[in-house]
Image: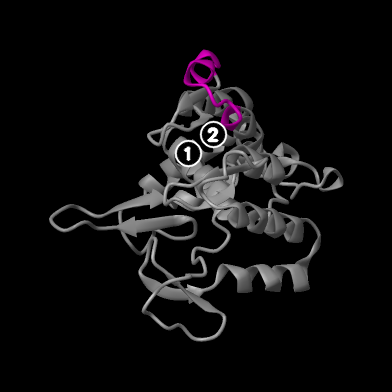
Amino acid sequence: AAETLRVVWAYYLVAISAIVNLASAQDATTTTTTCIEHCAFDANTTGKCLVSRSYVASLIQLYQGGIWGDIVGHLQHCELHGKSNCTATANCEVDPIGLCTASRSWAAAKLAAPISEGGVGWGAERCGILGELLAKGAGCSSERNASLCAADNQCSLTDQKNCGVSQQAVLVLLRDEYRDELTRVSLRRAQCAAQKSRITCLGDCQWTEPPGMQGQCSLQTLDALLTVLGDDCPLR
């Protein structure tokens, strides 16, 4: 359960980040670096020219439209208000590098909500535990007060002082609602561990041989995650 928890937690954070940071490069207003057309200098993280946020947004709105077009529109709406007016703008917040973007609670709710309600449709029915975490995360992220966050046994403060789903809540959810899936993961992990050579370590198993240590066969990390995701989840 501990290994599955670690993988699920990592996927949950990636899903939230994917929508909040739909494109990493913000169009720079002042820079000595010249990028080619449709690119922008990313001074905040990589220090490189990347595909610009505005170009990515225009492509999504032109070819995808619909829900993802609405999401891109909201990201641009937040960005236009800038850092100084960000928190006063509905469903926007300042991210760790100082840009105004979609709030984590809005992003989580948008991902988990059914398509019929204007969401992406990655809820529990479609994406299993990840969908449940997104729904719970939307509620936790809306708590702006640290004491209210701590009072909810489903939530806890992150290192960045944001309120999110607690890892303990994830572990309880795994054990209570995904017991059969965890049992299957344990059996497959034991089957992989029983293989003592690279030749027999096949399929969903992977062989690792750290320097100075004996090689071992283990279940692929991604495979443990797929066990608790819905069969129809786009993230599979």
Look at the image and tell me in which quarter the C terminus lies.
Answer: bottom right
Q: Is residue 89 magenta?
A: no
Q: In the drawing, does residue 21 fall left or right of residue 45?
A: right
Q: In the drawing, does residue 26 fall left or right of residue 66?
A: left
On screen, residue 170 above or below 118: above
Q: Position of residue 68 (x, y in %)?
A: 73, 59
Q: Is residue 236 visible?
A: no
On screen, residue 124 above or below 102: above
Are circles 2 and 1 on residues that touch, CB within 8 Å?
A: yes
Badge 2 local density, few (<14 within 10 Å), some, or many (20+)?
some
Q: What residue is drawn where x is 55% and y is 26%?
A: 144
Q: What residue is drawn where x is 16% and y is 58%?
A: 211
Image quadrant assignment for residue 227 = top right
Residue on which the image places disc 1 = 4
Q: Is residue 66 visible?
A: yes
Q: Position of residue 28 (x, y in %)?
A: 47, 70
Dot 2 falls on a residue whose secondary structure is helix
Range of magenta residues: 140-153
Residue on which the image places disc 2 = 182
Residue that protrudes farthest toward the bottom in the picture: 36
Dot 1 falls on a residue whose secondary structure is helix
- The residue under label 2 is which amino acid type? Leu
Q: Nearer the viewer, residue 219 or 226?
A: 226
- The residue under label 1 is which amino acid type? Thr
Q: Position of residue 142 (x, y in %)?
A: 61, 30
Residue that protrudes farthest toward the left in the picture: 212
Q: Position of residue 98 (x, y in %)?
A: 44, 50
